[in-house]
Every structure is written in structure tokens, then in C-alpha cells.
Image (cartoon, rainbow, N blue to C red):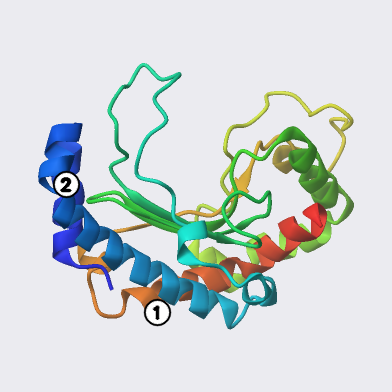
């Protein structure tokens, strides 16, 4: 369960994002990380109960939690740390190309969902072709009542083309989805929700609602 102290640490890191501050608050970081690690372990176990591919992967939370250090080599922003904790639960771990379930913890900006974000071109092409070939099934997934209740904005694109992608013509029924550069769901949570006693169960319900989308994407990538 996420605590107020975890949110407090992340809020402090956002306002003082430098190595001196971080070292002075390393104990708070270790406590906050342990809090998030326990949450990730609980989520992996819960997702494993309804997604066989996750259960078979035997995931360690460390293989799903993103590092807090930023890669600043090619960035104008030289802030050394991310200001959120992020976990991505997918088949074979966060470095694999498969779609999965995610949660980002950040004071005032926490969100979760599922899918695939900015996949490499070969993987993106496979997903597009799966949608094109099985558009009726895709429409059933994204219009299903439980899915819509959790994600009223539907499937989100991580960028979108202005023209049909190479290999697809403008007459395809699925054209608008084929222009997407990624396919994911997203739902935001308040700080009050995140620290509430029933939050983890609610987040797992969000993941369950996304499972047909994840299965569809991963079928294309398998």
C-alpha cells in the first residue's frame, strides 16, 4: 500500500531535484522505494491470477520497476532523477517488446492502464496488421461496457500519423487506429485514491478491464 510518506518524498524530490538533496534524503528514498516495491509485488501476484503469461514469466518486481535515475546524456533537462515511481508488468519483464499493465506514482499526477507505448517499427507494424485483419474483434474489445466504464476516452495513441501508414490504403475501415503509433489505456488517480485502503483492488480491476486489449496486442507480437 502506498503511504503519505512515499508521496511526500516524491514531492520533495520534484522541488529539489539534485544529487545533494537526494543523498541527504536517501533513507526516505529507500523507505519510499520499499513501499512501491511491495506494491509492485502485490500487483504482479494479482495480475498473475488472471493473466497466464504473467504467471508463467515468474517476474521479479525489480525487473518491472523503472530506475529513478534519468538518462540525461542527450537531454537538455539535466535533472538527475525522475519524479515518479513507475512499474510495467508484462511478459518477460519491462525490457521485452510485449504489451502489459502499468502504474505511475507521482503526487497529483498518478495514472495507470495497459497496452503498448511507442513500440519499435516492426512491432508496431504487426499490431497494425492485426487490427486491420481483425477489426471487428478490435471494435468489440474497445467498446465493451466494462472497458468503456474504466476508460471513457478509449484507446490512446502515443503519437499519430496524418496519413495512412506504409502498406495500408485510406479505404481501410480501421484507418484511424492504423495511424496510431502506440495503443494504451490511461486512467488518472488522485492522491487520496492512491493512499486509500482499497486502491490496489481498484487498480487490479483496471488491469482486468484492459486484459482483452493486452491479449490482442501480444497475439500480434507472439
Mark 1 and mark 2 residues within 8 Å of each other at the beta carbon: no
Q: Residues within 10 Å of mark 1 (few under 14, many from 20)?
A: few
Q: Position of residue 182 (x, y in %)?
A: 64, 42
Task: State the residue position of label 1.
Answer: 201
Task: State the residue position of label 2.
Answer: 11
The furthest residue to the bottom: 49
Q: Residues within 10 Å of mark 2 (few under 14, many from 20)?
A: some
Left or right of 55, for residue 60: left
- Residue 161, numbered label: none
Left or right of 160, for residue 168: right
Compared with 100, 97 (above or below) is above
Name the mark nearer the viewer: 1 or 2. 2
Nearest the viewer among 38 and 212 is 38
Snapshot quadrant of residue 1 = bottom left
Compared with 215, 81 (above or below) is above
Nearest the viewer among 176 and 159 is 159
Q: Is residue 16 visible?
A: no
Amino acid at each position: 500500500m502506498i503511504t503519505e510518506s512515499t508521496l511526500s518524498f516524491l514531492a520533495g524530490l520534484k522541488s529539489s531535484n539534485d544529487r545533494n538533496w537526494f543523498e541527504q534524503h536517501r533513507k526516505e528514498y529507500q523507505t519510499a522505494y520499499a513501499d512501491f516495491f511491495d506494491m509492485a509485488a502485490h500487483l504482479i501476484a494479482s495480475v498473475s491470477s488472471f493473466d497466464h503469461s504473467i504467471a508463467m514469466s515468474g517476474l521479479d518486481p525489480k525487473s518491472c520497476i523503472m530506475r529513478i535515475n534519468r538518462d540525461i546524456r542527450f537531454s537538455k533537462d539535466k535533472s538527475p532523477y525522475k519524479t515518479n515511481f513507475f512499474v510495467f508488468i508484462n511478459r518477460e519483464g519491462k525490457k521485452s517488446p510485449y504489451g502489459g499493465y502499468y502504474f505511475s506514482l507521482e503526487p497529483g499526477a498518478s495514472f495507470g492502464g495497459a497496452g503498448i507505448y511507442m513500440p519499435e517499427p516492426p512491432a508496431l507494424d504487426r499490431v497494425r496488421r492485426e487490427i486491420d485483419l481483425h477489426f471487428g474483434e478490435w471494435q468489440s474489445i474497445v467498446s465493451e461496457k466494462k472497458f468503456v466504464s474504466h476508460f471513457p476516452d478509449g484507446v490512446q495513441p502515443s503519437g499519430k500519423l496524418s496519413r495512412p501508414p506504409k502498406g495500408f490504403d485510406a479505404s481501410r475501415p480501421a484507418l484511424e487506429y492504423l495511424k496510431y503509433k502506440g495503443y494504451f489505456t490511461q486512467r488518472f488517480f488522485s492522491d487520496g485514491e492512491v493512499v486509500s485502503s482499497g486502491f490496489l483492488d481498484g487498480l487490479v480491476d483496471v488491469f482486468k478491464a484492459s486484459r482483452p486489449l493486452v491479449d490482442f496486442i501480444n497475439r500480434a507480437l507472439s
